[in-house]
Each structure stands twice: as structure tokens, then as C-alpha cells.
Image (cartoon, rainbow, N blue to C red):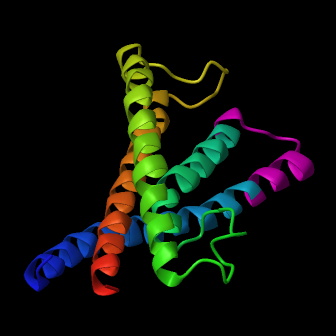
Amino acid sequence: MSNHLQTRIGRVAGLLESLSETVGRLVSWLVLLLVLLIGYDVVMRYLFQQGSVALQELEWHLFSLIFLLGAAYTQKHDGHVRVDILYRSHLVSPRGRVWIDLAGTLLLLLPFCLLVIWSSWPFVESAWEHGEGSPDPGGLPLRWLIKAAIPAGFVLLLLQGVADALRNLVRLREER
């Protein structure tokens, strides 16, 4: 792999990572909004005995957005749970860790993302076609919007996985 190719691969990975970073930072504001919303909901329910189905559903939707759209950011910052027994031990060299990361990305992460994107799309499409809303009185309309966050979140995670794979390929080349 030439230095020119490595530079281009690095740029592509950087672009993909900047998308994960930007979306992650935007999504982090949803955490603050969710906390404020839950606080308001608790005060209204326990002090004024007034609850709202739409408010509770909005809380669930915000949590879903945080989880789904924040997954790529978490992946970028190596924050997902993994079994580190071998990975962090002295038995695996730094180059071995790169191979583990690359294999995990190519054999597990990317195929799983593709599977979720492919299998969730009909779910979103059906909600859109039927104008699905909340089945509860006073609930939120446009349920297809929150369902669309499923493939969107996994597309972002897939793109971050591609960036990780590209970075690991460059690392393998550099450590030769």
C-alpha cells in the first residue's frame, strides 16, 4: 500500500469519523433535554397529579434516539463493551489487537449492521404507509419517525465501522 493510498484512506476514515463525532455531539444535547423532560414529568405527576401519555412517549423516543444515534460516537471512542480478557492482557501484542479489531469489525460489526438495516426497513416503510401513530389516547403521531431511527442509527454505526476498518488496515501497514 503506497503512502498516497494510505493518506487517501486516512482522509476517508477521517470524514466518516467526523460524521460520528458531529452526530454524537448533537445527540448529547438530547441527554440534557431528556433529563429536563423527566424532571418536569415527575413534578407534574407527583405534585400536581397530571400525567401525559405524549410526554412519556417523548421520553422513550428521546432515549431511543440517544441510544441509536449515539452508538457510532461510542464506537468511535471505543466505549462499547467487549470481552477484554485476551485483548488487554500481555498475551496479545499491539499488532494482534489491531487484527482482533479488524476481524471483529469485518466479521461481526459490519454484517450485523447490514442485517439490522435490511431487516428494519420494511418495519419503517409499513409504519409510513399506514400513517402509524401511538395506539394510546393522547400519544404521539408519526411513529414512523422513531422507527426510522433504527436503520439511521445502524447506517451511522456501519460508517463508523468502515472508518475503523480503514484505520486498522493503515495501522497494519504502518506496523510492518
Would residue 46 be counted in the magenta stretch?
yes
Q: Nearer the viewer, residue 11 or 60?
A: 11
- Main SS of the magenta segment? helix
Residue found at x 88% / y 42%: 49
The magenta segment: 39-54
Residue 119 falls in image quadrant: top left
* In the image, farthest residue toward the top: 130
Task: Indicate the position of residue 117 as horizontal and vertical percent values.
Answer: 39, 36
Answer yes or no: is residue 168 visible: yes
Relative to 6, does residue 36 appear above or below in the rendering?
above
Would residue 148 be counted in the magenta stretch?
no
Quarter of the picture containing the C terminus is bottom left
Answer yes or no: is residue 148 visible: no
Q: Nearer the viewer, residue 41 or 88?
A: 88
Residue found at x 39% / y 53%: 106
Residue found at x 41% / y 18%: 131
Q: Nearer the viewer, residue 71 or 29?
A: 71
Q: Is residue 35 left or right of residue 96?
A: right
Residue found at x 45% / y 58%: 103
Residue 3 falls in image quadrant: bottom left
Task: Indicate the position of residue 90 as horizontal and vertical percent values.
Answer: 67, 84
Task: Indicate the position of residue 53 as horizontal and vertical percent values.
Answer: 70, 33
Task: Indicate the position of residue 7 as horizontal and vertical percent values.
Answer: 15, 82
Q: How many marks?
A: 0
Relative to 59, does residue 93 appear above or below in the rendering?
below
Quarter of the picture containing the N terminus is bottom left
Residue 51 falls in image quadrant: top right
